[in-house]
Amino acid sequence: MPRMPSLYRAVAFAAATVLAACSNDTTGPNTNGDVKLSVVNALSGDVGAQLKLDQTSVALPTSGHASSMMVTAGSHRVQLSSESGQSLVDTTISVAAGSRHTVVLSGSGVTTAGVSVATDTISTGTGGNGYRSIVGSVLMVNSAPGIGPFDVVVYQANSDSVYRFGNFAFGAGSLPPPAPYGFYVPFVPATYTFTITNPGAPTALATTTLTLATDDRWTVMLTTSIEGGLVLQATKQ
């Protein structure tokens, strides 16, 4: 895989769009008829919510974490409601056999709660030549409404590589709104430190570190604490 440039600007995903994987493919295509669905709870602060898939309750992972399940190919109804039962999101997603998707629950309450779906074309190879890549991937999600935009600066351990992603703001470039703004990026296996800064500034406002292995999928999410401070957290899917 060619080394990424020291300053690399990605594009946003709009529900189901990601960056294409690198071309160093060594394994065959994913032909499994089941579909892996990851759920990332990026709801900010102390937001209580209930999630249903095809009108069946799904246990939410704790805030800042992820869980996964296998579902059948086809259309699925996703419903997010408040603890009191008020409907926040009611949408339908369609998934193909052998695909992988991440359902991101974002926002900080009734007015900003959203559901966004990212499709993993990096590990499945559906965005390239149909083969899985030897790299891993990181989905970066801003779930902090009304704050930012920020830069995401990524430092690779034992390397001089630095990656900067700009305009990291909730609700920008994602459909349907409200939804988090995200980058879905392939990285070679290594340890990375992710920092949030003001645009062009060097000072880190929030930081998290992860160690990525081959074919790993991680989510790095920006949320706010109950006190209003920025929280950057990494969770493995």
Image (cartoon, grey):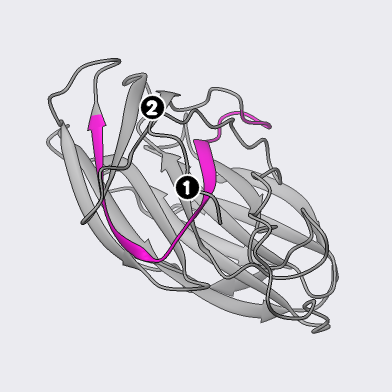
Q: Between disc 1 and disc 2, whose residue precedes?
A: 1
Magenta-colored stretch includes residue 176: yes
- Crowding at dot 2, Cα within 10 Å, few <14 / some 14-19 / many 20+, comes out as many
Say which of 170 and 112 sits in front.
Answer: 170
Give the image location of residue 37, x and y in percent.
63, 69
Give the image location of residue 229, x and y in percent.
15, 34
Magenta-colored stretch includes residue 62: no
Location of residue 5 (image quadrant): top left
Give the image location of residue 174, x and y in percent.
62, 30
Q: CA distance from mark 1 to mark 2?
A: 33 Å
Say which of 87 and 37 sits in front.
Answer: 37
Q: Quadrant of the N terminus?
A: bottom right
Label annotation for residue 145: 2
Q: Residue at x 49, y 28 (%)?
A: 9
* Of marks 1 and 2, the one in the foreground: 1
Q: Is residue 94 above or below residue 42?
A: below
- Crowding at dot 1, Cα within 10 Å, few <14 / some 14-19 / many 20+, comes out as few
Q: Is residue 14 left or right of residue 178?
A: right
Q: Is residue 98 above or below residue 24?
A: below
What are the residue bounds of the magenta stretch?
174-196
| Predominant SS along the magenta part | strand
Kind of residue at disc 1: Arg
Q: Residue at x 38, y 47 (%)?
A: 43
Say which of 56 and 204 sits in front.
Answer: 204
Q: Residue at x 68, y 32 (%)?
A: 176
